[in-house]
Image: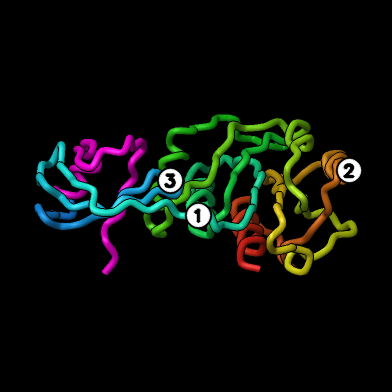
Amino acid sequence: MALPFFYLSTYEGATQFQLDEGNSRHAIAVLRMKEGEELLLTNGKGLILRCRITEAHKKRAGVEVLHTDQETDLRPNVTIAISPVKNNTRFEWFLEKVTEIGIQRIIPVIAHRTEKQQFRRERMQQILISAMLQSQQAWIPELTQPLRYNDLLQLDGCKRKWIAHCLETERISLRSAAVPGDSQLLLIGPEGDFTPEEIELAIQSGFVPVTLGNTRLRTETAGVVGATLLCIS
């Protein structure tokens, strides 16, 4: 059975320390862990600490570090740039699933037809942390601040750039076009899709138009399908 997995925002190298109140409560009050039992801590940047509980306190549980490991980031170099949607629950579902799949970066994009403007970063970051822990990973995807569409088009650093849209124009299948091992950026539009002008601007900026399948997908579903095609090719 896998050891319980917890998030540690900072670690300064101590061999013994106390967990914060949230982790202490979850370990001791919810999971009912006892002194002598072991757990895992990660900072979301590849560090994993194997620890033993030395004091089963509900607000400040004490632990000692038994082993430390720094994992190499083996996730595919995949970025999903996606327009936020009106329904918070649906967008949070997207964040959870692409974290489980194992992408490296998420960029919220404000396009012409983007309806939702509020960005609850703290809430979204917690979703990413929970999904990382649930899937037993040690790396959290980078969640950037929202970018305006034109600013997103100017980003460098990705060898392959794709734009998924629904217009009946020439597109290729992302399934066949994806190049495992290359850095890849997939752009997903808002619930009303990109405007023809936005699509043309993306093409001029080096983005290749792609289709994700034969059906019309919701924004958040398209993001998950795209992440799957790029990460599990």
Horizontal side of residue 227 vs 55, given as left or right: right
Q: Earlier in the sequence, mark 3 or mark 1?
A: 3
Gap between marks 3 and 2 measured at Cα:
37 Å
Mark 1 lies on residue: 72
Q: Nearer the viewer, residue 219 or 208?
A: 208
Inspect the image, locate mark 3, and give the three-letter code of the amino acid beneath it.
Gly
Please name which of the two marks, 3 or 2, marks the residue nearer to the observer: 3
Estimate the spatial distance between the alpha carbons at disc 1 and disc 2, rounded to whole Å.
38 Å
Residue 185 location (% of width, % of height): 71, 49
First to last magenta residue range: 1-28
The nearer-to-camera label among 3 and 1 is 1
Residue hosting label 3: 44
Residue 2 forms part of the magenta stretch: yes
- Residues 19 and 99: in front is 19
* Residue at mark 2: 200
- Asked if residue 71 lies in the magenta stretch, the reply is no
Task: Answer whether residue 131 is visible to the viewer in this image.
Answer: no
Quadrant hosting residue 62: top left
Vertical order, 10 against 191 (above or below) = above
- Picture mark count: 3
* Residue found at x 26% / y 61%: 3
Which amino acid does the dot numbered 2 rest on? Glu
